[in-house]
Amino acid sequence: MNEASLIIGLVIVLALIAVAIYVAQRQRSHQLRTHFGPEYDHALEGYGHKRAAERALAARAKRVDKLQIQPLSPLRRDELHGRWQVVQAKFVDNPGSAIDDAHGLLSTVMREQGYPNAKFEDEVELLSVHHPVVVQHYRAAHELAALRSRGQGGTEELRQAMIHYRALFEDLLNANHKENRREA
C-alpha cells in the first residue's frame, strides 16, 4: 500500500506541475498578445509556430529593455513636427523626394530616441515593442517606397506611403509627448 500511495502522490504532483506550466504558458501568451496586438499575429504568421513566435517577441522586448529609449524634449518634438509639415507640403510638388525625406525624418526621430540605426527588419522589430499598433504602417510605407525605387507604383502609392509614414511619425511624437507630460 505504501508504494501505491507513493505512486498516486507522484502522479498528483506531476499533474499539478503540468497544470501550473499550462497556466503559466497561457498567461504569457495572453500578456504577449495584449501587449503586441496585431504584431503578435504577424509574428505567428512569420514563425508559423506559436512557441517560436512568442520566444521571438519576448526576445524583442528584452533587446529594447537594454536600449536607452528616451522621450524627446518638448522643444525638439515641436521642431520635428515642424519639419514634418515641410516634408508633407513638399509632397505636392515632388512626391518621391518627400517620401525619402519622410523616411529620413523617421530615422532621425528613432535615432534621437535611442533606437539604433539598423536594417529595416531590425528597426521594425525594435519599434514593435513600444509601437505595436502602428509598426505595420512602417512596413506598408517601406513596401510602397520600394515599389517606387523599382520604377513601379505611381503617385497614389506614394500618397499611401506618406500616410503610413505619418501614422508612425505621429505615434512616435505622441508617445514622447505623453512621457514628457508624466515627468512634469
Image (cartoon, rainbow, N blue to C red):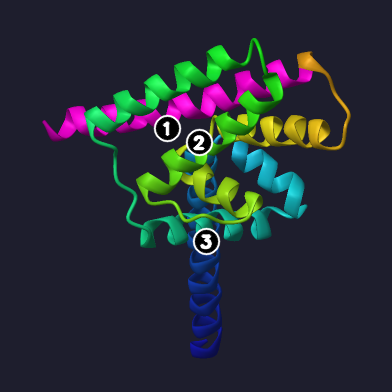
Q: Are marks 3 and 2 in contact (CB under 8 Å)?
A: no
Q: Residue 72: x percent and y percent?
A: 29, 37
User: For the view shown, which residue lies furthest in the left direction?
Assistant: 184
Q: Nearer the viewer, mark 3 or mark 2?
A: 2
Q: Are marks 1 and 2 in contact (CB under 8 Å)?
A: yes
Q: Residue 104: x percent and y percent?
A: 54, 38
Q: Per the image, is 182 magenta?
A: yes
Tell me which segment is drawn in magenta.
157-184
Mark 1 → mark 3, Cα distance in angstroms: 22 Å
Where does label 2 land, which residue?
Answer: 106
Residue name at image x 38 percent, y 22 percent: 81
Q: Residue 74: x percent and y percent?
A: 23, 28
Q: Are marks 1 and 3 in contact (CB under 8 Å)?
A: no
Question: Considering the numbered disc 1 on the image, is that residue within a helix, a strand or a loop?
Answer: helix
Looking at numbered disc 2 in the image, what kind of residue is underneath it? Leu
Which disc, if any, is residue 118?
none
Left or right: where does residue 160 sit relative to residue 16? right
Residue name at image x 44 percent, y 43 percent: 110
Q: Is residue 37 above or below residue 91?
A: below
Where does label 1 land, which residue?
Answer: 172
Looking at numbered disc 3 in the image, what kind of residue is underneath it? Ala
Which disc, if any, is residue 59?
3
